[in-house]
Amino acid sequence: MATQKELIQEVHQAVLGVEGTDDKGLVGDLKELKTDVKAQNGRVGRNTLKIAGIIAFLAGLGVLGGLEISDVIHLLGS
């Protein structure tokens, strides 16, 4: 049976990781996820702008003449 001190140490290691190793614990994992989400969000934003530009270009050429504006908005929302 683990002592209270050992349990506290295990929880500490799980949350903050083990110093001097690659294990960064839950805090490190959350920081890594935050970085990944920010990068992904940036890519999504850029792609949304590209899609809007393509739709505007095609609409200008008349290619999308048969689509209603609600259809175009739906395409952007997907």
Image: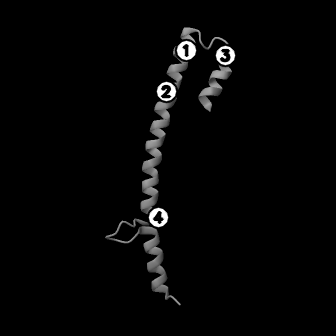
For marks 3 and 2, give the CA distance.
19 Å
Q: Which residue is mark 4?
A: 26
Q: Which mark is residue 69?
A: none
**Which is more foreground, mark 4 or mark 3?**
3
Q: Residues within 10 Å of mark 3 (few under 14, many from 20)?
A: few
Q: CA distance from mark 1 to mark 4?
A: 47 Å
> Front-most of 63 and 30?
63
Report the residue marked by disc 2. Answer: 49
Please, what secondary structure does the residue beneath circle 4 have?
A: helix
Amino acid marked by disc 3: Leu
Q: On screen, 18 above or below 53?
A: below
Query: Is label 1 or label 4 in front?
Result: 1
Q: Residue at x 44, y 48 (%)?
A: 36
Residue 33, x across and y down, in percent: 46, 53
Q: Amino acid at mark 4?
A: Leu
SS assignment at label 2: helix
Residue shown at 46% from the left, 37% from the top: 43
- Tell me which residue sits at (50%, 88%) in the image: 2
Residue of label 3: 67
Where is residue 78 drawn, in percent x and y? 62, 33
Residue furthest out toward the front: 63
Q: Quadrant of residue 16?
A: bottom left
